[in-house]
Image (cartoon, rainbow, N blue to C red):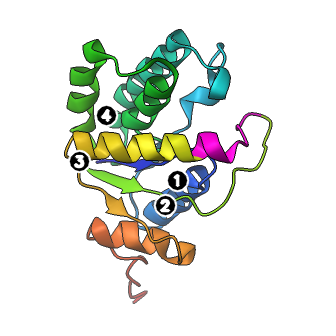
Amino acid sequence: MKIAFLGTHGVGKTTLCFELAAALKRLDQSVDIVKEVARRCPLPINRDTTRDAQLWILHNQIAEEIALEPAYDVIVCDRAVLDNYAYLVNAAGRQPQLEDLVRSWMKSYHLLVKVPVMSAPRFDGTRDVSVTFQQAIDRLIDELVSDYGLSCLQLPADDRSGWVAAVLSSLRLPSEAPQLDLF
């Protein structure tokens, strides 16, 4: 099973990935995380990104997902290929030669979870802090989700504390492991 979090930068996807992975481990699922690939990109990212940088990110995201999926019950992705494509579209416009790849790859996720913008991004050494840029990417992600006819679990912006439980419920998993009798 592969779960991907959709959303712009600075919305809490990484934290949510680790929280969900911990919850899944408590449910005896073998789990790993595809961490955000952009942070390892050797080319410019954020507002200074290039088409080549975003292609590197998109293809490395796919490669990491392919490498992890056979080894675990659950793969939690800190972004989906669609997110990476949104940054590419923002930098260089729609890429007709990639549309089929992105559309097809999006079918490989068992659950897509859209993380809402709740605050401005904070600088962490990599992340762009422009609210305008953050909102532009969020709008592009929403536009691509709509254009591709994708179904997403929309997390509520008013209750972050219930996000992991909402994802587990959507997967029809309990929020806690059942208590086993000792004797």
Sequence-first tag of 4 and 3: 4
Asked if the residue at tag 2 contacts the one at tag 1, i.e. Cβ–Cβ closer than 8 Å, the answer is yes
Q: What residue is disc 2 on?
A: 20
User: Going by the image, does 168 lie left or right of 35?
Assistant: left
Q: Amino acid at mark 2?
A: Leu
Q: What residue is disc 3 on?
A: 150
Name the element at disc 1: helix
* Residue 145 shows in this picture: yes
Q: Residues within 10 Å of mark 1 (few under 14, many from 20)?
A: many
* Residue 78 shows in this picture: no
In three-dimensional space, the C-alpha distance between marks 1 and 3, rounded to whole angstroms, equals 21 Å
Q: Which label sits in the foreground, 1 or 3?
A: 3
Q: What residue is disc 1 on?
A: 17
Whole-percent x and y of residue 92? Answer: 47, 17
User: Going by the image, does 128 lie left or right of 161?
Assistant: right
Q: Which residue shows up at 21% across the image and 38% down it?
A: 107
Q: Amino acid at mark 4?
A: Pro
Q: Which mark is residue 70?
A: 4
